[in-house]
């Protein structure tokens, strides 16, 4: 059987991500009918269905889930191959593949992009965006050299350099009684409607919020799930909800009647790290980590850990 074209893999990945043909087509900048034809062509080549769909819903099959996971790796490798070849053609000596989340503080990203390495004067940084749990997996698999991750569990496969340690921020309506507080306690949020980023975005943080709340006998009245901060404002206004967000995401929606307060809960912190493979042999990666540590120290952000990167 001939291997499917990259465009067909990209079509399946987009549909799996949104489970909505219209949004997936917009993401790919193609028409919905074109996307439907691509999925039909791909399923015909494979000989099985990737998605169960009717006029109202789209669901991914078990075979589709397995296919999309591997297809994502294939597309990622193909994109890296093109990027690497293009950079070499344009005269770059080395490419550092840096992963980040769309929720990563832009100042932190710009700080990392400003790093220069004397041993690698032609270094170029290629950015890749994904959720933190996926970024960690991509570092472990070797698809990324380094990644800025927030709220991932420790694993011996990764070495972590702590960059910043922030509280969650609670987004709420300006006329909410809790807005009178300078900071919000978890107990203030008992029996209120909560807005959480989908568990798919970060299962570790999602579960931790509910676990810490349950341990204090603090539960929401209801939970609303979103995929992006831009979806939060309407839920806050319509349901008098309280939204758990990273600081940068909270700032993005602090307008039009929405304000934010830090959550004073020591068990719920957003620790952001620079993650690399524990067994990395890359001189470029090691030099970048050391330079990052020095850069953060110079900004008085004082990382609280050091990566055990010895040798060259």
Image (tube, rainbow, N blue to C red):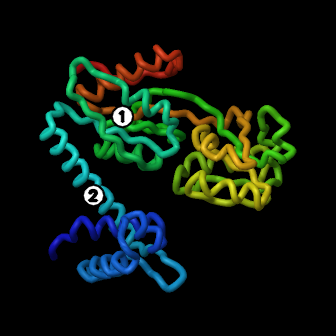
x, y (%) of residue 139?
Answer: 35, 42
> Looking at the image, can residue 214 be seen?
no
Can residue 89 be seen here? The reply is: yes
Q: Using residue 110 as the reference point, say whether residue 213 is left or right of it.
A: right
In the orientation shown, which residue stands out farthest toward the bottom? Answer: 55
Q: Nearer the viewer, mark 2 or mark 1?
A: 2
Rate crowding at label 1 as few (under 14), some (14 to 19) or many (20 or more) other CA atoms within 10 Å: many
In this figure, which residue is indicated by the disc labeled 2?
A: 75
Identified at 27% across, 83% down, the residue is 44
Between discs 2 and 1, the one toward the N terminus? 2
Residue 48 to residue 94: above or below: below
The answer to whether residue 48 is left or right of residue 257 is: left
| Residue found at x 52% / y 43% | 103
Q: Are marks 2 and 1 in contact (CB under 8 Å)?
A: no
- In the visual, does 60 lie left or right of 142? right
* Residue under the point 49% across and 77% down: 58
Q: Which SS class for mark 1?
A: strand
Q: Nearer the viewer, residue 24 or 119?
A: 24
Q: How far, Cα to Cα, is label 2 from label 1? A: 21 Å
Task: Please give the residue where the numbered disc 1 appears in the rendered image.
Answer: 276
Query: Quadrant of the rendered structure where residue 5 is?
Result: bottom left
Q: Which quarter of the rendering shows the N terminus?
A: bottom left
Determine whether, in the image, residue 289 is placed left or right of residue 165. left
Compared with 118, 160 (above or below) is below
- Residue displayed at 37% across by 72% down: 64
The quadrant where residue 194 appears: bottom right
Position of the C terminus, as image quadrant, is top left
Q: Residues within 10 Å of mark 2 (few under 14, many from 20)?
A: some
């Amino acid at each position: 059987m001939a291997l499917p074209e990259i465009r067909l893999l990209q079509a399946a990945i987009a549909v799996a991500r949104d489970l909505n043909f219209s949004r997936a087509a917009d993401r790919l900048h193609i028409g919905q009918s074109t996307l439907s034809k691509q999925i039909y062509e791909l399923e015909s080549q494979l000989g099985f269905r990737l998605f169960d769909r009717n006029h109202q819903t789209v669901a991914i099959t078990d075979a589709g889930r397995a296919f999309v996971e591997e297809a994502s790796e294939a597309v990622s490798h193909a994109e890296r191959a093109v990027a690497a070849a293009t950079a070499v053609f344009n005269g770059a000596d080395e490419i550092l593949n840096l992963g980040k989340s769309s929720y990563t503080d832009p100042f932190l990203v710009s700080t990392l992009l400003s790093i220069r390495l004397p041993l690698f004067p032609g270094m170029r940084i290629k950015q890749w965006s994904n959720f933190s749990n996926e970024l960690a997996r991509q570092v472990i698999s070797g698809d990324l050299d380094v990644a800025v991750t927030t709220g991932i569990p420790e694993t011996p496969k990764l070495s972590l350099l702590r960059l910043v340690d922030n509280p969650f921020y609670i987004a709420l309506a300006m006329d909410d009684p809790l807005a009178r507080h300078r900071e919000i306690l978890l107990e203030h949020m008992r029996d209120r409607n909560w807005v959480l980023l989908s568990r798919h975005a970060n299962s570790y943080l999602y579960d931790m919020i509910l676990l810490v709340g349950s341990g204090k006998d603090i539960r929401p009245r209801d939970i609303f799930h979103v995929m992006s901060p831009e979806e939060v404002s309407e839920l806050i206004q319509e349901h008098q909800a309280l939204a758990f967000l990273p600081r940068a995401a909270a700032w993005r929606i602090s307008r039009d009647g929405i304000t934010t307060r830090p959550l004073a809960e020591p068990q719920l912190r957003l620790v952001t790290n620079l993650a690399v493979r524990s067994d990395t042999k890359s001189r470029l990666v090691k030099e970048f980590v050391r330079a990052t540590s020095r850069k953060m120290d110079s900004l008085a952000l004082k990382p609280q850990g050091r990566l055990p990167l010895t040798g060259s």
